[in-house]
Image: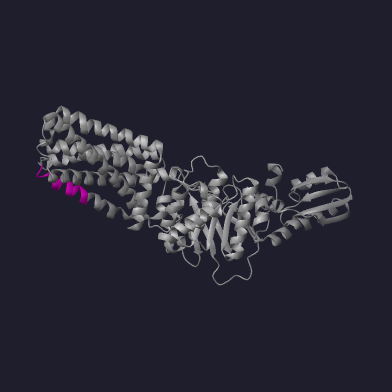
Amino acid sequence: MSAAATAKLPLPARVVAAPRDLPVSAPIELTGLHKRFGDVRALDGLDLTVRRGTVCAILGHNGAGKTTTLRTLLGLVRPDAGTVRVLGDDPLRDGRRVRARVGVVLDRDGLYERLSAEANLDYHARLHGLTGRRRRAAVEAGLRRFGLWQRRRERIAGWSTGQRKQLALARALLHEPELLLLDEPFAGLDPVAATEVRALLAGLARDGDRTVVLTTHDLAHVERACDHVVVAERGRVLAQGSLGELRAQADELTVLVRGAGLTDALLDRLRDDGVVLDHVRIDDGVRVRCPATGRPRLAAALVGAGVALEELRPCGASLEDLFLALVAGRDAEAA
Amino acid sequence: MTDVVTVLRKELAELFGDRHSVYGAMIQTAILVALCGVVVPLDRPTVWRDAGAVAMLYGVFPAVLAATFAADAFAGERERRTLETVLATPIAARSLFLGKLAAAVALALLGALVAMTTGAISATAAAGALPPALTARHAAMILLGATGYATLTAVLATQISMRVAVARTAQQAASMLSIAITAGLALVLRRLHVDLDWDTLPRVAGAMVALGAALVVGGDGGFRRHRIFDPDGPPPPPPG
């Protein structure tokens, strides 16, 4: 999709489906968050509510505000405006209580390369107030859970990204947190390790009634691992809902069109007018991607251009299609 | 208090657990010991009569070690991307600060102790008898002075470390600061017409310990977590 075509797209409606049936105390409630770093607007009125016991993915490009959101949840960044409630508390005012109930894997992995795997876990177990036999048991259980017990005395410098990520996850789970915050948990993992981590996260949410919030820009993992998805861009939430809800929205965006007079020239013109994002010819029809609210406009435009429409129907778009359409609309809005 | 000890242990384990760090620390300690513990006492065993010179040898030089170590405290962790994860735990930022500070002061004391012991042995070997000023009281005074000086420089170096993004920059600033404090102290003592001798040394050492403690307490604003991680001004974290 060309930049020129993108720039002319109409503004998409913000597809924000608020989660239903919220318990009284959702683990995360963010309202109207704003944060600037100099000239950079990291959060721009971000609203987010996450249900207990879900695996929630915050999806977005670099600069979408994902990491800043996680840092705000931990009280590491003070928002310029807006309210933050994590497990019922304000992380800036009641930070100690919040952080005692939250497990994190942030940024890289935060492991000390000069220490052994066991010493890394032991240090964090102590910082979380675990003592004596309980601490030693938690460290051993964490190492065994990820098959790292035999390597516990090794210094972790030189470990692979996947092994380090597993150790970081073990560290995050030491104190059995109610809420897990994971920044890019699948980055650097091989397919086997990624599958194991996905299963672990699903198990934590299902059996332990824990809430997992992860950031990623990997859509494949989101579709397999998460039951709630938030699409963020430039510090705002563009869409959120269950996977089913978002897939339904995505279906609305990609259509199969058949009819006489459906030329490439016409579709290019519609793209310039912002009615179409892009199109691909398949068999005797055309697969067309529209902006978020574009399908009725597309039908009207085609009929208006003299196309004898035989068929125009949703054709099973992916989450990626929805993501790209939403982001393209936001780019146009910014332009 | 438990958290302070936890951080202290981890800092020292990191220092002594890493081959490169151990080599670095050993080289600095070896230079310190060779100079203050061997060369000077062998050349001039009577140096032990001069309280000012002894304080400089076994108090000031080890404190420079402490300042270099303390400068890495936060800036180094920020650079190695471990600081954020620690700040995401329930530990009080002040405990984190005190643990790192205690590790730096402990390192200085260890350096002072090794240098002083070696110095006494060297002076004894050169003069054929124990240095005349080396009594338990004098040794305690020297260590008190080293503690005061190390606390003062380490507090300031740690404060610098909280505000600077790169460890090397923090270490350079801390080294300059150590020199400035030494020069400033000499100037103040001169202005006050105080000659460092075995009577005035305990008072000067005590004043430095008090000043260091006051800096710890007075620097409370810098301990706020979001300021350590996200100080107003540089370095802004990459948005994302």
The secondary structure that dominates the magenta segment is helix
Where in the figure is residue A203, as x and y percent of width and height?
61, 61
The furthest residue to the bottom = A24
Q: Is residue A182 left or right of residue A308?
A: left
Q: Is residue A254 visible?
A: yes
A217 lies left or right of A116: right
Is residue B121 shown above or below A194?
above
Q: Is B207 within the magenta?
A: yes
Stretch of the chain drawn in magenta: B198-210
Q: Position of residue B16 (x, y in %)?
A: 37, 41
Residue for point 52% across, 50% down: A149
Residue at (63%, 45%) from the top-left corner?
A190
User: Residue A74 vs residue A227: left or right?
Assistant: left
Examine the rendering and report whether any part of residue A131 can be seen: no
- Picture layout, residue A244 above or below residue A186: below
Indicate the position of residue A60 as horizontal and vertical percent values.
61, 51
Q: Is residue B133 magenta?
A: no
